[in-house]
Amino acid sequence: MDHRKYMTILKLDEAAIASRRAFFSLSEDDLARLASLRPLAERITDAIVEEFYALLLSHPDTRKFFGDEATIRRVKRTQREYFIGLFSGRCDTAYVEDRLRVGAMHERIGLAPTWYLGAYRQYLQLIREHFDVEIKDPVAAREGFFSVQRIVFFDVALAIDTYIAANLEALGRHQAAIRELSTPVIRVHDRVLLLPLVGAVDSHRAQQIMESVLVHVVDAQARCIIIDIAGVPVVDTRVADHLLKTAAAVRLLGAQVVLTGITAQVARTMVQLGLDVSSMHTLSRLSEGIELALGMVGKSITTRPT
Amino acid sequence: MSAHGQIPILRIGPTLLVSIQIELRDAVAEAFQADVLSAIEERGTTGLVVDISGLEMVDTYVARILAETGRMAKLMGTRTVLVGMRPEVAATLIRMGYGMEGVRTELDLDAGLALFGHIIPQK
């Protein structure tokens, strides 16, 4: 997924960015301090990146993300840019977009938050050590480090949000796939469709079933759609009501519903509950339903003489 | 402009064919009903085919006008068939509890005309 999409999903407009910055205590002073530390950052970037990758490459679980030497050279270069970016003195929409791109990239290669967070811990420690050596005044070193810490945590939050957004997005796609699978309309013959229903039918699914059935009937110019309910565990008043509504809507289109898969148990329940399904053709076996439906389009199944 | 004649009524032998392409608002709907009934009165008519494939929205008012027109035509000896309803229209009508019982429906114009003996050869 594109990082700009994450901007939208996470609703990262200017107000949201300002609110985040306030919560992370990332002030204009911090940004100014970071900008003033930029020459120092440029001096120590090579050393920090080398030490950082020494850790990443020494651990088997992180090592596997960096294939050959060329990849390592490339990611080190990116890392240098990232490090210098912390000292840009900016924290605007462009900065956030850039950070989301990094987060999205890590999510794409499947680097779990554990390693990501662990790597940041190491990162901060390295920066602290270098600051202590390079900045003579201990108060200034501490202040500078605090500013780095604020922007790093700001970045980490963005990365974690990207992970979560990516996973939620994947979940949404899977739900859509399941929804699609829950109404598999099959073409039995010209103008004859079949919808085998499996699993419980709640109101939400019933709505989808109706919409899907109607669209398929029109698309296929179907005369008849067979709905087989053999795989529906419980057929109660509500389910029957949904089926009747679907049948009524199908009729409005000029087609018919044949309901099959009515077991003895279901037949008994329907009568005991006083459900009137006489507006649909009902049959117990799917094969009978197919024969009836074919009859409606002027076809019939015959036995070939042997 | 008068609301009459806004929806053209075509005659194929003893069958009337109406295709509704514009929104049926009050005056237009009433004029449509009157036009259809006087067309039936004018000449021997046995069938009325109403094509609503052009309608993206049908509210209960329009549904009632259509169903009523069918019942009125029936009284004059003309059978009515409604053809080409869109899926979303059907779903909405059912959701509003309006199943248009008693109105004959068919998928498309071919099927509607076939009902009155106009067989269109298929490729």
Image: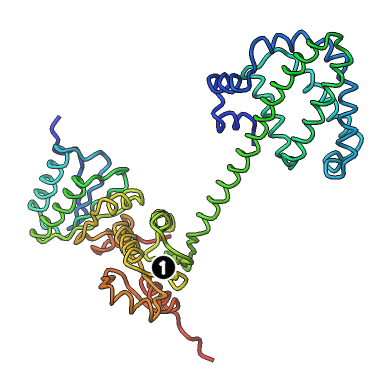
Q: Chain of mark 1?
A: A
On the image, which quarter does residue B20 sit in?
A: top left
| Residue toward you, A40 or A1 | A40
**Total label count?**
1
Q: Is residue A299 visible?
A: no
Of the pair A92 and A305, the residue shown nearer to us: A92
x and y percentages locating residue A7 in the rendered image:
59, 28
Q: Position of residue B66 (x, y in %)?
A: 18, 50
Q: Relative to residue B58, is residue A105 depicted above or below?
A: above
Q: Which residue is mark 1?
A: A227
Image colouring: rainbow
The C terminus of chain B: image quadrant:
bottom left
Q: Residue type at mark 1?
A: Ile
Q: Nearer the viewer, residue A290 or A243?
A: A243
User: Foreground residue, A258 or A61?
Assistant: A61
In the rendered view, tell whether residue A115 sits above or below residue B87: above
Q: Is residue A2 left or right of residue B33?
A: right
Examine the image and state in which quarter residue A210 appears: bottom left
Q: Is residue A193 visible?
A: yes
Crowding around mark 1 (Cα neighbors within 10 Å: few <14, some 14 to 19, many 20+) is many
Residue lying at 37% horizontally and 77% vertically, measured from the top left: A283
Secondary structure beneath disc 1? strand
Seen in the image, is A149 located left or right of residue A12? Answer: right
Q: Position of residue A23 (x, y in %)?
A: 59, 22
The quadrant in which residue A290 appears is bottom left
Left/right placement of residue B31 relative to residue A209 reads left
Q: Residue furthest front?
A: A139
Q: Residue at x 60, y 38 (%)?
A: A165
